[in-house]
Image (tube, rainbow, N blue to C red):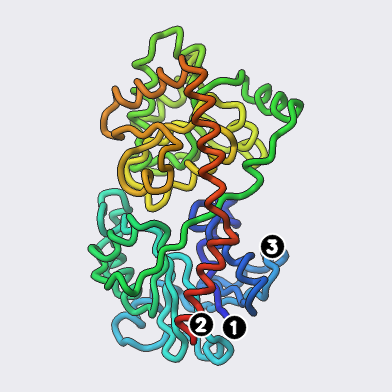
Amino acid sequence: MRVGFGVTHLVRGLLTDHVDGIGIYTRHVLGEISRQAEVTAVQFGRCSELDSLRQQFSVPLECLPAGFQAGTAFSVLTGQSFPRSRALQQRLDLFHAPDHHIPRLTHVPVVATIMDAIPLAHPEWASARLRRIKNFAFRSMARRAQRIVTISEFSKSDIVHYFSIPPERIDVTYLGVNPAYAQPVTEAQRAAVLGKYGLAAGYFIFVGTIQPRKNVARILAAHRMLPAEMQKAFPLVIVGRNGWGTDELLPELEGLQQRGCGRWLSNVSDAELHALLQAARGLVYPSLYEGFGLPVLEGFAAGVPVISSNTTSIPEVAADAALLVDPLQTDAIAEAMRRLAENDVLAADLRERGRERVQQFTWTACAQQTMDVYRRVAG
């Protein structure tokens, strides 16, 4: 089977040294699929961006240089194939768009991965610039795909509702976890990372881009509700770049260290993150909305007790392996943190449950299910 695989979002992440959830999905599924099919990675954008990245791809990497927004507008308005794609179409049996860059290819079936319905369900969490036009184009292009892949039953129900796509056209393939999270770091490695950031093992940690959806304001407020001595004994470490809509949090994030109650680490390497997770007392991730919640599984793999939300996709993914709380109730988040700080038996039980739960989620299984979708679409 000859598969075209979109990598525009991944390329942008590699160029900015910030590969997020969609990029992680693209990289892992592309790698697994390439072992089973003839794959061409396709970027929609400036071809000059590819020169420094080709060595990071194990498959041929091609570029369609037409601007994606202009090409999308043309395709949405006319119903015709994406500009400059004719040569590509002649060499493919199927195209998989793993991000929002979903082309229309007249003679090639398209499978589109939609992680969640956030742009339509919660437009207030997306950039206001051209929001309505972008959402119209996203919805139109998604509805023209022959098949939709999503990452949880919760996301499937939201896509049915907000995109008006019949449920029988949507397949659920759960994400996997990078095995590196489960590899124990050595004592020397952990000591080096903790020493670099002035930390001692046993803190609460949050991992993710700082934006309203991630609920960092309530995490900070919940930690402040703990007794003063507990805040010092179990400080709060925020790991993530500043996204948008959180300017009022910046002084508080920067003040964590000044108060002796934690740190804000805006840029850490993957190896450092693995060490930081494995040295934590607990991962605090009460996100307001998740299509899947990959950081929860990464915490499980790292052997960290997890506090997360009892809403959206999190209960489906975490099951009984995490402390699930109402993410809108700051006192509930604080109470879960207090319980985890005081109760060693609870912490040990959550670690064991998490390690068992994460075994059910692998990138190999995700890719196998994706290949099954390809076979149904391409015949």
Question: Would you call the spot at circle 2 few (<14 residues within 10 Å), some (14-19), or many (20 or more)?
Answer: many
Residue 194: quarter of image = top right
Question: Would you call the spot at circle 3 few (<14 residues within 10 Å), some (14-19), or many (20 or more)?
Answer: few
Determine the CA span between mark 1 and mark 2. 7 Å
Q: At numbered mark 2, what does the secondary structure look like: helix, strand or loop?
A: strand
From the image, tell me which residue sits under label 3: 56
Residue drawn at x 64%, y 41% is 182
From the image, tell me which residue sits under label 2: 94
Left or right: where does residue 133 sit relative to residue 149? left
Work out whether residue 93 can be spotted: yes
Q: How many marks?
A: 3
Please report whichever mark, 3 or 1, sits nearer to the chain's N-terminal start. 1
Residue drawn at x 47%, y 71% is 97
**Residue 196 place in picture, x, y as percent:** 67, 25
Residue 165: quarter of image = bottom left
Residue drawn at x 40%, y 31% is 323
Closer to viewer: mark 3 or mark 2? 2
CB under 8 Å between callouts 3 and 1? no
CB under 8 Å between callouts 1 and 2? yes
Query: What amino acid type should be assigned to the residue bearing mark 2?
Result: Leu
**Residue 270 place in picture, x, y as percent:** 63, 42
Query: What amino acid type should be assigned to the residue bearing mark 3?
Result: Gln
Closer to viewer: mark 3 or mark 1? 1
